[in-house]
Image (cartoon, rainbow, N blue to C red):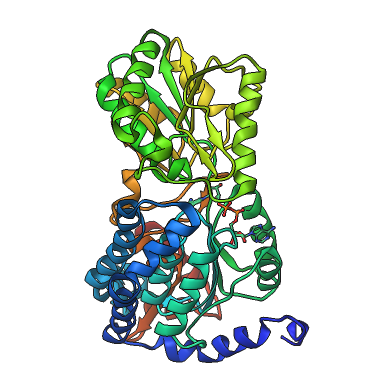
Amino acid sequence: MTDFKDNPYFQLFSKQKMHQYEIAQRTYSQRVKRLNALQRAIEMTYRAQIQDALYKDLGKPKVESELSEIYQIVGDIKFAKAYLHKWMRKQKVKTPLSMLGASSYYIYEPKGVCLIISPWNFPFNLTFGPLVSAIASGNTVIIKPSEMTPHSSALMSKIVADVFTEDEVALVEGEVEVSTQLLKLPFNHIFFTGSPNVGKIVMSAAAKHLTSVTLELGGKSPTIIDKTANIEKAAKKIIWGKYLNAGQICVAPDYVLIDESIKTEFIEACKKLMKYFYSENPKSSKSYARIVTNKHFERLSNHIKNAESLNATIEVGGQRDSDSKYIAPTIVSNLKDEASLLQDEIFGPILPIVTYNTLDDAIEYINAKERPLALYVYSKSKANTKKVIQNTRAGGTCINNNVIHYANHNLPFGGTNNSGIGKSHGLFGFQAFSNKRAVVKQHTFGVTEFLFPPYTELKEKLARLTIKWF
Ligand code: NAD
């Protein structure tokens, strides 16, 4: 540990390291007390301030703050409180006959000192969500939120200091350099939410200490619409899922893959709904958020410019205003493969439409890219839906809907390969922050003792019988 003496966070880390076994031994009701304190802070004391911070950082409408931030965290807490007693119990398992005289179980023990690094798009939800799992499983935690949403990060720092002591949960604000320093420390687990590129940096830092990781990453999440789909209904869900938080959602439909024959009908349905959701002038709509920073505004503007330079069709939208970091809800079609909109994760309010002739073509198109965090399919055909699911891989899927799988705490949430490693939410989040410790208790004389040295011919026969019969 002397290697870390110059690390600015070593003292904080050491404090938590010393305190970890005390925290780990908290009973169910003591853990619930901590969760209740966090719930009170989010749901009551700081609710209005959370909405205010989100409005300042992202222009987030109140209803979206309520549903996608406060409701999610409170839901996480309620779910953990309802099941924690069960999760904390010894999990008994069978013991084979060859181990007669012993019983077996495993326990979920806290990993220890954990690091949570979070992104900016749902700053409260994606910081406090994993924190709920970490506290429920009895860990100490250092949090590093995103520097892109300074109002939210400052408020989270205040909430954490109000609810927890520093040796239990601490929040450190700052830019990349802060993460870099924290990542040098030998944490027992790192829970990272962010981009695949930074995920790789986190994983290589973790490898130095063989620290376990949960990586909640992103990428391009495709949406297939086949010709049996209900186009009106599909358009309604996609427009909601794509333009919520101005498209800055890891599970937003990144692009649509649609049967060529229904493309025009689908785009017309989308245009109608966009007008209905956000009016003729989305810029003045109170239901539409803003882009987080100038850098991201530029990144998204460049996508549109690139599409235009390749003669793509801007079906709707395209307008932008750098002063207010506004980008209109936009749909683009007739894109060439090399268009940046079809290469990079968009993470903004631009929806490319790509057409296909056969479902096999659509599957091939998806499988040629990195494995997505989410894959959506709109279809009335069971056979088509089954075919898509069986022939692709993704972190999660909705059939005839999008985004909502995130909100079911009974489901594991996370990606696969490039879109993530490990799962979160509910039991899966509790497991991510726990070590499953196997315990075998010997009650009486164990039959295996017959096979201890010195080895004889009889013992050799007994070993063979054991293989054959037990
Ligand atoms: P990001 O990877 O740029 O940043 C995430 C966090 O990592 C921030 O706290 C940031 O300070 C830190 N960071 C940035 N560069 C770093 C570096 N070089 N070394 C160490 N730490 C560093 O991601 P973002 O822009 O905040 O969020 C957008 C990405 O996150 C998208 O790819 C999106 O799909 C993904 N995302 C995934 C989920 C999920 O649950 N799977 C949720 C939200 C966002």
Task: Say which of 247 and 96 sits in front.
Answer: 247
Residue 138, given in percent of the width and then of the height, sits at 41, 80
Relative depth, front residue between 58 and 266: 58
Residue drawn 59% across the image and 72% down it: 173
Q: Is residue 344 left or right of residue 444?
A: right
Whether residue 470 is visible to the viewer of this picture, yes or no, is no
Which of the image's four quarters has the C terminus? bottom left
Kindly indicate the quadrant of the structure image that contains residue 258.
top left
216 displayed left or right of 295? left
In the displayed structure image, the side of residue 400 where residue 261 appears, left or right: right
Q: Quadrant of ligand 1?
A: bottom right
Residue 406 seen in the current view: yes
Q: Residue at x 49, y 16 (%)?
A: 361
Q: Residue at x 34, y 64 (%)?
A: 73
Foreground pick, 461 / 377: 377
Residue 404 locus on image (x, y percent):
31, 44
Say which quarter of the image contains residue 266: top left
Residue at image point 58% right, 16% down: 312
Residue 321 at what x, y percent from top left?
55, 38
